Amino acid sequence: MRLYNACGLCLQLFPSDSYTISAPHNVIIAQLKNFGLSEEELKERGSESLALWANRLPICVFCSQFLDPDEESGIALRVRKDRDTTKYQPFFDAAYPDTYTETMRRREARAAARRLKDDESTVTHQTLTSLPPAPAPAG
């Protein structure tokens, strides 16, 4: 006889031997808040029970993408509201090395253009007029 347990986040039943991670109840409640559950729905899930907060619940493979045990909050960075969306980390796929290389070239070109633009914006007209004249070419 195969045992089934409910995922702590989505409440779907899966074979108990298919779970790979678990998460504390308080992290699950925090993620459900991020998903927009109402206070009443959160209360039904035990959000006010301090006795449950330290309990770890199994998390299915699908829901594990929303949780990150390495983050202090337990919430995966890609789903957190305070994430920095300007930080792009390209993914290298050995089957498409040119895509990665081209992406990195475009990224480096944009960064160089931003640096150049920043450098140009710091030079003012007053700075240009106060500089000594350039030396005459040798020859």
Image: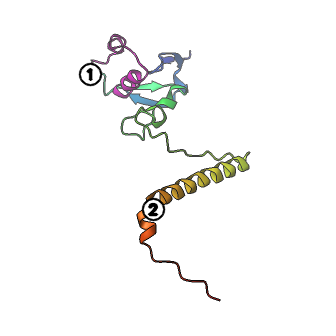
Residue 71 location, x and y as percent?
40, 40
Give the extent of the magenta segment.
26-51
Residue 97 location, x and y as percent?
71, 50
Residue 128 location, x and y as percent?
46, 67
Q: What amino acid is at disc 2?
A: Val
Residue bearing the label numbered 2: 123
State how far apart marks 2 and 1 are (Cα): 62 Å
Q: Residues within 10 Å of mark 1 (few under 14, many from 20)?
A: few
Q: Secondary structure at mark 2?
A: loop
Residue 88 location, x and y as percent?
54, 44
Q: How many marks?
A: 2
Q: Looking at the image, tell me whether mark 2 or mark 1 is earlier in sequence order.
A: 1
Task: Say if 139 sits above or below 23 in the image.
Answer: below
Q: Nearer the viewer, residue 68 or 103?
A: 103
The C terminus, quarter of image: bottom right
Disc assigned to residue 51:
1
